[in-house]
Image (cartoon, rainbow, N blue to C red):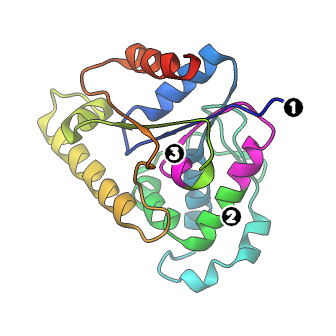
Amino acid sequence: MKANLHIAIDGPAASGKTDTGILLAKELGISFLDTGLMYRAITYYFIKSQIDENNIQCIDKGIFEKINIQVPDSQNVILNNIDISNMIFSDEVNNKVSIYAGIQSVRENLVMKQQLIAENSDIVMVGRDVGTVVLPKANFKFFLDCSLNARAIRRMHQSDKKKFVNEKNKINYRDLLDKNREISPLIPSDDAVIVFNDHINLKETVKLIKDIVLN
């Protein structure tokens, strides 16, 4: 029986992993999952339910029975049968997602769901701990990275200096949270291919990865 093809792509915020993963999956004709959308969805749920991230003891396993997250494609997210795709990129969610993602019960629950999604699928999965935790036995692992300046520019128009500095500070703050959290910190797996994409575009990044996968 042929084993499923699992490709893990990790990286910090605005490193291009999502766009790379979407195009790579399309060219290979396989499924795609952005695990970050699931963390955004659960963060949105906690915010709307007024569950304080500092009151971790109230976030027990029982609460996850009330949460049904579906990610039918790369852009749409359904939470308890409600489309929240346009709500999960608010500043409020942006500022909280790394905090909630660092809570052990949250991490364990979503990792289990992500592993079930990949269980019988050929898939490109992107996130911050896919190669290290979610799919540690993935056929191929990649870690995308680039400078803080390049990532901030990708998030806004470079001509607006004030917005650029603000975006840079926000990304740097998320990096610190993601890299220093106790549960599943953002680190490349030992066997990941590190891809620095400051000076290569999306198509070039995908070609580089695709050549490795197919050869």
Residue 194: quadrant of the picture: top left
* Residue at screen point 22% across, 41% down: 148
Q: Secondary structure at mark 1?
A: loop
Q: Residues within 10 Å of mark 1 (few under 14, many from 20)?
A: few
Using residue 82 as the reference point, say whether residue 20 is left or right of it.
left
- Mark-to-mark CA distance, 2 and 1: 29 Å
Asked if residue 120 shows in the view, the reply is yes
Where does label 1 land, which residue?
1
Give whichever of discs 3 and 1 has the lower sequence position: 1
Which amino acid, by three-letter code, is at mark 2?
Asn
Residue drawn 40% across the image and 53% down it: 187
Give residue 33's position: percent from left, percent from top.
Answer: 63, 37
The residue located at (75%, 44%) in the rendering is: 117
Residue linked to disc 2: 109
Q: Which residues are magenta?
A: 113-132
- Looking at the image, tell me whether mark 2 or mark 1 is earlier in sequence order: 1
The answer to whether residue 169 is above or below residue 200 is below
